[in-house]
Amino acid sequence: MTDTTTPRGFADVFDTEVVGRWSAPGRVNLIGEHTDYNDGFVLPFAIDRRTTVTVGRRDDRLLRISSTFEEGVHEISLDALDPASMSGWSTYAFGIAWALSVAAQHSDSPAFAAAGGDLTTIDLSTARGLDLFVDSEVPVGAGLSSSAALECAVAVAFAELWSIDVNRSTLAAVGQLAENDAVGAPTGIMDQSASLLGQADSGVFLDCRSLDADVVDLGFAAAGLEVLVIDTNVEHAHATGGYVERRSSCEKGAAALGVTSLRDLDAGDLERAEETLDDETFRRVRHVITENQRVLDTVRTLRTEGPLAIGRLLDASHVSMRDDFEISVPELDLAVATAQATGALGARMTGGGFGGSAIALVPAEARAAVEAAVVAAFADAAYTAPTLFTVNAAEGARRDG
Ligand code: ADP
Ligand code: MG
């Protein structure tokens, strides 16, 4: 975006003194799509694009927030943290404060229980208000989880400034609670886990049932590989439509097959699933079963053979999402097919689907050719031009200053 005005910053909006800056990354999901809410496996990595929140302390009980994303200041009182009175993008941040304030009531939920820690120690009754200014390098709605980047940057800032002593997994659960119950998007815990637990050059292998998180060396750079993100610029909307529908198909499939979640099934159950379920529900279930296995295979392959050998798993994941889960769009299919045909080792759509981005694992020397081919293919198809950039696996949420 070109803008001739001075960029807005904290001091243009607030007059409190800055006490620190915290940031959290977006994420790319390498593999494991729509498996998180099925108690399955995912392998995202935090990326080197971050959302930064600059914070000033207030003397009252107000939370005030502004962003380069939009003019204006949103405000809420710490004495009136109610999702019903939140609206717009600031809900992602205010929702974190609300989720912290009610976390103890959710201590039995799987995410909080697995994270451990004493949630009754979280006390916002005397916490002082804050001024928050948000600036982000994570494109919105591109499947890179700008929402989790915002939530997690805010969560680590709140935790430190309000002396909340909980671990990162608890903060991930807080982020999920905010996104589910304040924003109203029924997403799993993957995005927040990646943003909080990510490390340089590593993936976060997450078991969404036990919530065990294991860091897996990706070794892309050492193998001469780059991850190219192809943002189709087709906008997706998680809170509505297809995502919710896919989620209920999975619940329906699990119920019909007599299991708590699709995680309880494996390839040996496919025949029974096909006999029991209608065709559409069967294909939704098959995607989840095979995708879970592909995540496990990817982790094993990375640990034994290295990243050059994971391409076919990425390719198979895309086919499954396109044909069985039906969450791709023609732009994503074209991006993937073109990347595969021009030198990528593997490619797949990433994120919730219905738009957003694809990723391609490309040898560094082939990247320019892949990029040019994708741009040309989109032009030929008269699609909106895609946005292309590479990402590296980066460190999770942190204090920056
Ligand atoms: P994504 O895939 O990027 O997470 P979502 O729809 O889940 O897409 O979240 C995007 C929303 O998050 C935006 O519409 C906005 O409400 C909020 N958001 C993300 N980044 C920012 C930002 N820098 N400033 C303000 N709001 C943001
Ligand atoms: Mg999101």
Image: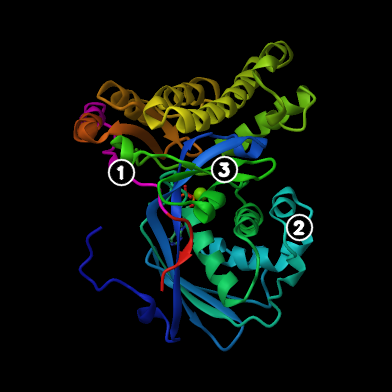
Seen in the image, is 74 located left or right of residue 245?
A: left
Q: Name the residue: 63% across, 35% down.
A: 40
Along the viewing direction, whichever of 192 and 331 lies nearer the viewer: 192
- Tag 3–tag 2 contact (CB < 8 Å): no
Q: Which labelled disc corresponds to residue 69? A: none
Task: Identify the residue position indicated by label 2 in the image.
Answer: 106
Mark 1: secondary structure: strand
Q: Name the residue: 74% across, 71% down.
A: 121
Q: Residue furthest bottom?
A: 59
Q: Quadrant of residue 347?
A: top left
The numbered mark, 3 or 1, whose residue comes first in the sequence reads 3
Q: Is residue 69 visible?
A: yes
Task: Identify the residue position indicated by label 3 in the image.
Answer: 240
The Cα–Cα distance between marks 3 and 1, rounded to whole angstroms, is 29 Å
Q: Name the residue: 72% across, 10% down.
A: 275
Q: Amino acid at mark 2?
A: His
The Cα–Cα distance between marks 2 and 1, rounded to whole angstroms, is 38 Å
**Which residues make up the magenta segment?**
375-394
Q: Amino acid at mark 1?
A: Thr
Seen in the image, is 345 located left or right of residue 187?
A: left
Task: Identify the residue position indicated by label 1 in the image.
Answer: 390
Q: Is residue 88 visible?
A: no
The numbered mark, 2 or 1, whose residue comes first in the sequence reads 2
Q: Is 378 colored magenta in this rendering?
A: yes
Q: Quadrant of residue 251?
A: top right
